[in-house]
Amino acid sequence: MIQEVEKLMEPRRLTQRNCDDETPEMVFTREHADLVKEGEKWMKTTAESCSITAALIVTIVFAAAITVPGGSNQETGIPVFKNTSPFTIFAVSDAISLFSATTTFFRKRFSGQLTEMVAYGLCLLVISTTAMMVAFRAMLFLVFCDQRPWMMAPIGGLALLPITAMVTLQVPLVVDLFLSTYL
């Protein structure tokens, strides 16, 4: 933030001091100390929320991966729907969701900058949630397509609600975080 203000100032004014013997940077830092504390608190809360959400997603998609839709052949152990496109979509989407949600934890532990950590975490959660909903829809297609095809339209529409909500609410925040971190 200070760098943005410095760009607007004349270079010679950056080192001038006021009547309290403070530079513009010192005044800016003092005046915005509470805002920095509130921002850090918000980011930590957001990072914790990301971790909780990621843990829930990991639990759900892992359970979905080991509970194969349609079951397995009792003799061979191979999934019944193995050679169908919806099963492939389910498996790939479930894996993407699992890996992106799991990666959220690693970003939390090893990232040096909080804004970068939150931006990556939110981005990975958007990917994970989208992949989870695609896997869910593919699984429902596998299970119900033959019996009740009319169910696919409302289920597909409802599956788009969390994706739309995540994208609408989180992507602008992710973009702002990336821009503030890297520009």
Image (cartoon, rainbow, N blue to C red):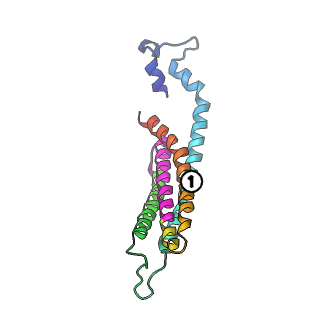
Type of amino acid under label 1: Leu
Observer-nearest of 23 and 176: 176
In the displayed structure image, the side of residue 89 where residue 38 appears, left or right: right
Q: Is residue 181 left or right of residue 159?
A: left
Residue lying at 43% horizontally and 21% vertically, measured from the top left: 7
Most foreground residue, 14 or 149: 149
Residue 123 colored in magenta in the image? yes
In percent of width and height, residue 138 lies at 47, 66
Q: Quadrant of residue 18?
A: top right
Residue at left offset 60%, top offset 36%: 37
Q: Residue at x 53, y 64 (%)?
A: 152
- Residue 55 position, x and y percent, is 54, 60
Q: Residues within 10 Å of mark 1 (few under 14, many from 20)?
A: few
Residue at the spot of label 1: 161
Q: Which portion, as a residue range, is magenta?
A: 110-137
Disc 1 element? helix
Which one is in front, 161 or 78?
161
Residue 82, given in percent of the width and then of the height, sits at 40, 75
Q: Residue shown at 51%/47% (left/top)?
A: 167
Q: Specify the principal SS of the magenta part.
A: helix
- Residue 43 place in picture, x, y as percent: 56, 43
Total number of numbered discs in the rendering? 1
> Would you say residue 132 sits in the magenta stretch?
yes
The relative height of residue 165 versus residue 7 in the rendered view (above or below) is below
The extreme left residue here reads 83
The quadrant of the picture occupied by the C terminus is top left
Query: From what the image shows, is residue 175 above or below residue 8?
Result: below
